[in-house]
Amino acid sequence: DNQFTVSQIFGSEIVRLNELYFLQNLLEKRLILKAGRLDAGNDFLCSPLYGHYVNNAFDGNPVSIFYNIPFTAYPDATWGAFIEAKPWKRLSTKFAVYNANNAIQRNKHHGMDFTFSSTQGVVWITEGCALVNQEKRDRGMPGNYKVGFFYLTGDTEKFSGGTQSGDPGFYLLFDQMIYRPQGASSGRGLTPFISLLFQPKNRNLMPFFANGGLVYQGPFASRPRDSAACGIIYGHYSNDRIAVQKKLGLEPQKAETVLELNYWFQINNWFYIMPDVQYIIRPKGLATANAWVIGMQIGLDQW
């Protein structure tokens, strides 16, 4: 009964329509437009580094935003419009608006509830990213420095009672390669990253969330497609919610922490094995015994 799901590989027990949209690239892909049924998690709060982990709080998006607002990711899409612009080769900016509809997760619709019912307004989101050393002639080590802001326009319930209009939040996502043994022509190297999310504590289950880790792509020269990863996840429950729990005589939920360590063995072009170990501290933020999780992820890819 811990907060952070220990495996991200799960869609649902039914056939479901996910994304369905119109896409237009302009100005040699310096301007991208999308509209239709979209997953916000494909375009915001994302990084290829997150795919090196098994716990859902890493892979595919920093998970606290899903606890706090109607943010969409596979296998649930909602109506939305998205624009990405690259005004300068080292700067990317994104803007989007999504219908905030909790009903889209119901299995009975199979992802085809195209109405605007059960809506909590819309989610506005914007993100800016500084792209470091990612041009072909760059010799330095690559990095990404992202700052994002989002805002839910609908009413949300406060822990102390009543509702409040609007729910803002912002996030910081940083990653920077710090070691590359074979120079710019190689993809091997060590990259640390960190993700930080912040929202108001009076109406959000987890107003502060952080994760971070180290990903070493190609730890051995003879196995450049392998990777080793370690990381830590920390989520702090709302202090306002804790105060309410204490008044009701309930054990307060404080914070949950997860440590993860894994190694990705790329056996050949279409098969990999990924043994994984996790250690959960204070499951669900309660004074429950800490727990070990030992597992293995296996992947087949023929496309």
Image (spheres, helix red, strand yellow):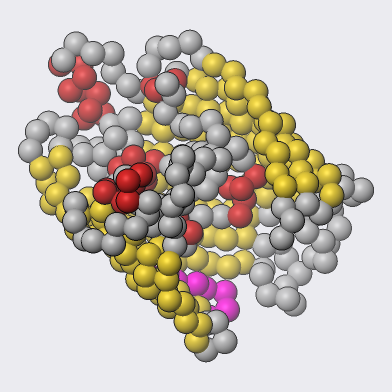
Q: Where is residue 234 drawn, in percent x and y? A: 46, 32
Identify the residue at image location x=75%, y=77%.
137
Classify the position of the N terminus by image quarter: top left
- Residue 81 appears anywhere in the view: yes
Vertical side of 137 occupied by 225: above or below: above
Q: Is residue 91 magenta?
A: yes
- Furthest toward the right, the residue is 222
Q: Is residue 262 magenta?
A: no
Magenta stretch?
87-96
Identify the residue at image location x=32%, y=64%.
79
Tell whether 13 sits left or right of 115.
right
- Furthest toward the left, the residue is 162
Identify the residue at image location x=14%, y=49%.
155
Query: Looking at the image, which is closer to me, 267 or 17?
Result: 17
Q: Where is residue 239 drawn, in percent x and y? A: 26, 29
Query: Looking at the image, which is closer to me, 146 or 291?
Result: 291
Q: Where is residue 208 drawn, in percent x and y? A: 36, 38
